[in-house]
Amino acid sequence: MHNGGGDCLCHFRAYGDCDCGKDYRRDLTQLTSSENVCTMTPAAFATALDDLNLSQVQFARLTGMTNGTVSRWVRGVLPVPLWAERLLDAWDACPEALERARSDSGAPTAE
């Protein structure tokens, strides 16, 4: 999932620093403008969740989205937003950030 490109967003202020060596500190809200079009397919989004051992409900809880919205992304009813794709890429590249997010939210951590 992670392409290692210069637009990687391994760091998010909400989840603190990471030891992966990347230093991209941008808010997720900067990724919601209309010129940022996501190319992630519903199947790729579902696969990314599976790869990270995240259910749709867990992803919704971690990101503040509704379960219905995440389900619509998986079913292709709504396009996957760019911020969600970038967040999944960041969590794939830096599993410690995902574990920190799970810990901060009270969600179960991966064993």
Image (tube, helix red, strand yellow):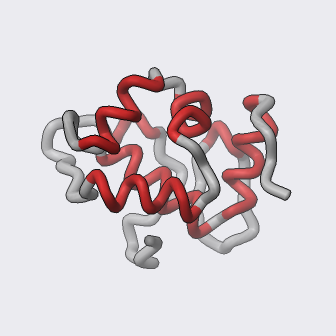
82 or 20: which is nearer to us?
Answer: 82
x and y, in percent, of residue 105 in the image: 73, 30
Name the residue at 57% across, 43% down. Answer: 55
| Quadrant occupied by the C terminus | bottom right
Relative to 23, say whether 97 is above or below: above
Relative to 7, say whether 69 is above or below: above
x and y, in percent, of residue 15 in the image: 69, 43
Judge from the rendering whether residue 85 lies leftward or rightward of residue 37; answer left or right: right
Extreme residue toward the bottom, this view: 4
Residue 59 placement: quadrant: top right
Judge from the rendering whether residue 110 lies leftward or rightward of residue 10; answer left or right: right
Relative to 34, say whether 44 is above or below: below
Judge from the rendering whether residue 80 lies leftward or rightward of residue 110; answer left or right: left
x and y, in percent, of residue 33 in the image: 22, 36
38 or 6: which is nearer to us?
Answer: 38
4 or 67: which is nearer to us?
Answer: 67
Residue 10 placement: quadrant: bottom right
Name the residue at 35% across, 38% down. Answer: 30
| Quadrant occupied by the N terminus | bottom left
Extreme residue toward the right, this view: 111
Name the residue at 80% across, 30% down. Answer: 106
Extreme residue toward the left, this view: 35
